[in-house]
Amino acid sequence: MEMRLWPGAAPSEPEDFEGPSDPAAKTAQVGSGGISRIQFVDEPTLTLYPARGETANGACVVVLPGGGYNILAWIHEGVEVAQWLNTLGVTAVVVKYRVPRRDPEHPHVWPMQDAQRAMRLTRAHAEEWGIDPGRVGLLGFSAGGHLAWATATNDPVKLTYPRVDAADDLSSRPDFLVPIYAAYLHDPDGPRVFPPEIRPGEDTPPTFMAVTLDDLDRGADAARMLIELKKFDVPAELHVFARGGHGYGLRDTGVPVNQWPKLCADWMRASGFLTATR
């Protein structure tokens, strides 16, 4: 089931922003490397993948595909991830947030509105969808990992868009966080500090991270984040693998980073997120 995040036009769209004329840009197109890409989103949505039958445990994970805020890697960082979560008894919600960048310097602003709205709508539909509103996680890849961090560490009550309905009275903060090879965790032209939209603190949810050391500086950035979370006694787990590169999702890399989904499932289970009582 796919539903629009906003009843009307998405908020705050720049007046001078023009999307592509080709309507195919709004649908997933297979490109190089067999990667399916959505190139343009101006009507953000969420797609529900409910856990079925006796396997359903009431947990839910909202999924943010990556793509550098320019495209969405829709299948291997979205649909396939939802299908994997379903095997764990977890309901998944995949967010089609706005791309490409509305502002080259601050590309997260519009997607963050979409991500916050998706978190609130998910909790608003908790009873209908058979999920526990206190066990809603947020998982993101690459730029989606950055977006997950921004969503999880900003004020969960303060709105970044005009109030739409009662769903916007709910918290946008996830109950647990899973950034996978998260990008943009520092300013490449400045000191190695977190960008202003990422504000780890004592209210940051329990976090699982996976990345590789050969993925530019992202392994080092994740390690710095682990140290920061430790300062605030935030439960966290980080796996840094030697090789694997970037953008693999759940797919076979031929190296040990393939283990991250099992490690993540074990962490969610051990943390109590896959059981009705914690």
Image: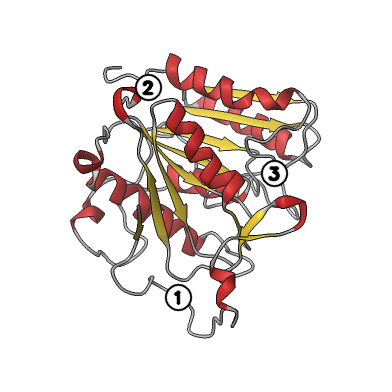
Image location (x, y in percent) of residue 261: 58, 27
Q: Which residue is mark 2?
A: 274
Label 2 vs 1, first from the N-terminus: 1
Q: Amino acid at mark 3?
A: Gly
**Closest to the observer: 171 or 74?**
74
Q: Which residue is mark 3?
A: 247
Question: Looking at the image, which residue is at 30% across and 49% down?
Answer: 120
Image location (x, y in percent) of residue 87: 45, 27
Question: How many angstroms separate mark 3 from mark 2 (CA)?
Answer: 26 Å
Quarter residue 247 falls in: top right
Judge whether 247 appears above or below 111 on screen.
above
Which mark is in front, 2 or 1?
A: 2
Label 3 vs 2, first from the N-terminus: 3
**Closest to the observer: 3 or 216?**
3
Question: Looking at the image, which residue is at 59% across and 71% down?
Answer: 25
Label 3 vs 1, first from the N-terminus: 1
Tag shown at residue 13: 1
Q: Amino acid at mark 2?
A: Leu
